């Protein structure tokens, strides 16, 4: 088998560190999307573990390229998955994070959503909250949250794959029609020790270049986010460095030429 | 509830002018007053200050059928204070001492105001 080539560069990795997700629009071929028609809801291990799904989705150069970029060499490829299927109108799910992975700053698992059909706002698209992937919460204790400033409804074309850091807040959005809505969920996992071996420029890793604050984030949360992003960046680069907030527009006093 | 009571007042003023008001009208008023229902509105300020901009919002309205509605990208008010100006009553304020400042992990959305309106 040919090696999987990483596709993200430093900026792509830094974007993911901040937002917690990557959207690959319409990457799966329409002929394969149609092979998923008629799939029943629930467990779909047979489909996800099949040779065709592995080739057309899981090892698609763009999809696997992002997984390789974020999880290192010889990442684990899913052999099973779940088909989230809705047809009748519904209120939408409540906000939740999956598993116990809401905290920490490593990247060990990518939970992915594949959409074999296009999804419109009225179809009840998956919603994600950018930057929420490291918020340490009890998933049942965020169920009363409604709309959140900066939330993203994944209104996508058929064949889109979204890769998220496990733990990102998400939900199925409200659905107001009876058009079938499919999403196939599966996860990649890391095996390798982290090292900056993605599609990176030569030389030493640059310092993390911070991304804008998300609209729902408060002032103190933005400082914490910045520290957390720097930690994730240094972890992914395989650096053993403690990070700290520092006002960048300053110099050591010994470097100043003064009289 | 206020709207229905106002309608009752309009109707009864007219009846009163014609001398047509009766005990049944008062029974109807009593029934209207017993029909109060609570609307609950969660608003998440970006600080404990009621003038702060909002980060999140959720309305729970048991007087309506529970039908799906599309997500909103903008809050219904600019601030908690603006909601109070529109007739909402605050029933829970965020308590600063409950916000643990230890460590550097973000967790829940802050700062949770719970408001009610009786209808």
Image: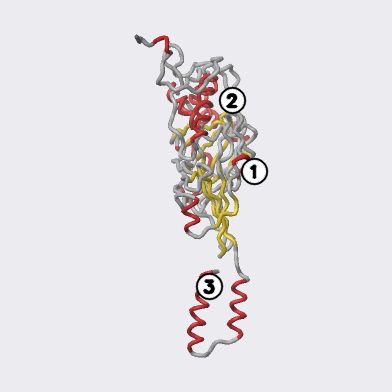
Q: Which chain carries label 3?
A: B
Cα–Cα span, label 3 and label 1:
38 Å
Looking at the image, is mark 2 or mark 3 nearer the viewer? 3
- Can residue A88 be seen? no
> Would you place residue A251 above or below residue A166 in this image?
above
Crowding near pointer 3: few (<14 within 10 Å), some, many (20+)? Answer: few
Q: Where is residue A230 in the image (x, y as percent from the top left)?
A: 50, 23
Marks 1 and 2 share the same chain: yes
How packed mark 2 is, by other alpha carbons closer than 10 Å (few <14, some 14-19, many 20 or more), is some
Give the x, y percent position of residue A88: 56, 54
Q: Look at discs 3 and 1 and give the one toward the viewer.
A: 3
Discs 2, 3 touching: Cβ within 8 Å:
no
Q: Is mark 1 on a helix, strand or loop?
A: helix
Query: Residue A234, position in %: x, y?
Result: 52, 19
For label 2, the residue is: A108
Q: Are marks 2 and 3 on the same chain?
A: no
Q: Is mark 2 on a helix, strand or loop?
A: loop
* Residue marked by disc 1: A140
Residue A242 is left or right of residue A256, and the answer is right
Q: What residue lies at 50% left-to-right and 20% top-to-bottom?
A: A4
Indicate which disc residue A105 carries.
Answer: none
Above or below residue A86? Residue A132 is above
Task: Check residue B4 in the rendering and tell me which mark sits there, or answer none.
Answer: 3
Outermost residue, front direction? A259
């Amino acid at each position: 088998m040919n090696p999987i080539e990483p596709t993200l560069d430093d900026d792509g990795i830094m974007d993911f560190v901040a937002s917690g997700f990557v959207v690959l629009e319409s990457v799966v071929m329409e002929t394969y999307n149609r092979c998923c028609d008629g799939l029943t809801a629930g467990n779909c291990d047979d489909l996800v573990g099949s040779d065709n799904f592995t080739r057309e989705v899981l090892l698609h150069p763009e999809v696997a390229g992002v997984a390789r970029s974020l999880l290192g060499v010889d990442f684990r490829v899913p052999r099973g998955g779940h088909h989230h299927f809705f047809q009748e109108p519904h209120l939408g799910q409540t906000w939740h994070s999956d598993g116990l992975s809401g905290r920490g700053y490593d990247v060990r698992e990518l939970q992915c959503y594949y959409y074999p059909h296009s999804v419109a706002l009225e179809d009840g698209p998956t919603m994600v909250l950018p930057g929420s992937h490291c918020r340490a919460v009890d998933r049942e204790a965020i169920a009363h949250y409604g709309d959140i400033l900066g939330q993203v409804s994944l209104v996508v074309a058929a064949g889109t794959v979204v890769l998220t850091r496990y733990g990102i807040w998400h939900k199925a959005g409200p659905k107001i029609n009876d058009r079938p809505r499919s999403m196939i969920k599966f996860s990649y996992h890391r095996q390798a020790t982290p090292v900056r071996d993605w599609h990176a420029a030569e030389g030493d890793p640059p310092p993390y270049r911070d991304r804008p604050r998300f609209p729902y984030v408060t002032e103190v949360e933005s400082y914490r986010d910045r520290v957390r992003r720097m930690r994730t960046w240094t972890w992914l680069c395989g650096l053993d460095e403690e990070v700290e907030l520092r006002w960048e527009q300053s110099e050591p006093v010994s470097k100043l030429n003064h009289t | 509830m206020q709207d229905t009571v106002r309608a009752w007042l309009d109707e009864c003023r007219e009846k009163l002018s014609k001398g047509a008001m009766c005990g049944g009208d008062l029974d109807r008023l009593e029934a209207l007053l017993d029909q109060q229902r609570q609307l609950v509105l969660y608003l998440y300020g970006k600080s404990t200050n009621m003038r702060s901009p909002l980060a999140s919002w959720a309305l729970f309205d048991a007087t309506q059928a529970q039908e799906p509605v599309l997500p909103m990208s903008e809050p219904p008010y600019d601030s908690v204070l603006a909601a109070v100006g529109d007739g909402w009553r605050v029933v829970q304020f965020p308590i600063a001492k409950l916000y643990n400042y230890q460590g550097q992990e973000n967790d829940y959305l802050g700062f949770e105001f719970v408001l009610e309106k009786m209808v």
